[in-house]
Image: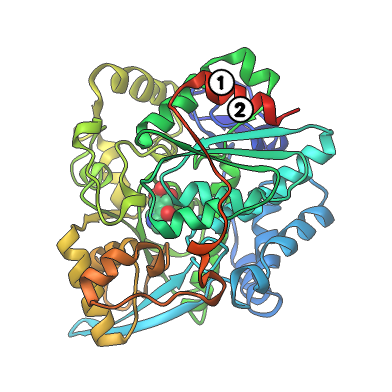
Amino acid sequence: MKYLSTRAPTNSTERKRFGEILLEGLAPDGGLYLPEHYPQVDAATLFKWRDVYMNQGYADLAFEVLSLYIDDIPANDLRALCRKTYTEAVFGTPEIVPLRKLEDVQTDAGVTPLFIEALSNGPTLAFKDMAMQLLGNLFEYELVRRGDELNIFGATSGDTGSAAEYAMRGKKGVRVFMTSPYGRMSPFQQAQMFSLMDENIHNIAIDGVFDDCQDLVKAVSNDLDFKRHYKIGTVNSINWARLMAQVVYYFAGYFQATQSNTEKVSFTVPSGNFGNVCAGHVARMMGLPIDKLVVATNENDVLDEFFRTGVYRVRGSADTHETSSPSMDISKASNFERFVFDLLGRDGTRVNALFNLALAQTGQFDLSADPVFSQAATRYGFESGKSTHSDRLATIQDTFKRFGMMIDTHTADAVKVAREHLSPGVPMVMLETALPIKFAATIVEALGLEPHRPPKFEGIEALPKRVTRMAADPQLIKDFIVQHCA
Ligand SMILES: *Cc1c(COP(=O)(O)O)cnc(C)c1O
């Protein structure tokens, strides 16, 4: 399997191997990597994979999916990496991503089963662990193989940074330098990150807001000599390996929601940077019988606007809302370019014109008059909807009252939007992207109850903290990195 950039000119023949793109973020032309083609899963393979998941488990299913995309790691090594990653000890259940039935919605036209797929039982209680835990093992494997090292430098307002730290802690060849806005994360999130005592994990609390942290990352990364010399890398959601790892749980969700491979299933996905639902798109392109992919947004409705109108309009920081589903508070959806590449018949020249030129000049592009726009729904199965703070409260209350189930704010956005997009007879799987304990304040607002806390997180706020506070100055950060690379 070879990979190409979404901005590669249509006549370009430049391709890369998996091992080359694993440690890279963006392609040099500013595009995102995608496989040259989507491997097709025929009926016999899907039949076999159902058995693999049901009888051998998630790790072996992950190996089956990943081996179609990775041919430069020997099969036995790749299988061992998958088995080391997806264990009951790390993810809490033998199914890894168990499905819970919410209800059967009855209408005159038929019965629609509603399920929640639990993706949040990893070390940081959010779905980012599903991909990041694999990435940690892949990075270590590749760096040891090359005799190389990597300094991961990033900015977080919560979920991504902690998932990265828990994935990279203790890994050979990897250090993590993670900035976060001082005093702005929830006490639970701070405790999760700052209580890590591993020598290769460095928490840096910046006097400023999240945008200041991101600006620091940009400033340091723009110093190309420094970046090269200190082997600075990232783990953001545009990394292809993260997206690929997420494809697996669409298959696992499908097998649990159906009895046979003649049935179709729809998914509703709480979306921010479009990474999660893009993995659903990849699964669908491989031939998994997915009916609809429903994109659920919060008040930051960049994606809902596109799927309703054909206009993709990036927001400025002034009109990016701070919401109670904060992991979906985005001004632009960084993985969206991958879908647009497929929608436009993989025309990299045109993708470059839209994302590199039109967006830079006007902050938007408009596909409403292009015949391909309607294919987003008709050919690719996309629908969308939006949920607000009051919708979240109402959905959390309704789900708790009728089913005794406590859901987090992001999952609530999915449940609200899913109910507006049901097709009679087609099971709807809503992806749970975090546990309620991570966003306790809104749960208390909705229910007047403290969410359940898994035993391993009992009392973490009281643990000793390992964090360095710093002014938002790129030189100070560089000095810190230099000092800790010695
Ligand atoms: C990151 C995140 C999302 C958004 O996922 P994308 O892949 O960016 O669309 C949704 N919910 C939670 C809890 C998250 O951490």
Quarter of the rendering containing residue 199: top right
Q: Which residue is mark 1?
A: 28
Compare marks 2 and 1 and give the one earlier in the sequence: 1
Is ligand 1 less than 8 Å from the beta carbon at label 1? no
Q: Which mark, by number, is residue 436?
A: none
In which quadrant is the N terminus drawn? top right
At numbered mark 1, what does the secondary structure look like: helix, strand or loop?
loop
Residue found at x 21% / y 72%: 446
Disc 2 crowd, CA 10 A, few/some/many (<14, 14-19, 20+): some
> Is residue 474 visible from the viewing direction of this image?
yes
> Could you tell me the amino acid type at mark 1?
Pro
Percent across and percent down for residue 142 are 77, 40
> Could you tell me the amino acid type at mark 2?
Phe
Residue found at x 32% / y 78%: 425
CA distance separating discs 2 and 1: 27 Å
Is 349 in front, or is 448?
Answer: 448
Q: Which residue is mark 2?
A: 480
Percent across and percent down for residue 400 are 28, 81
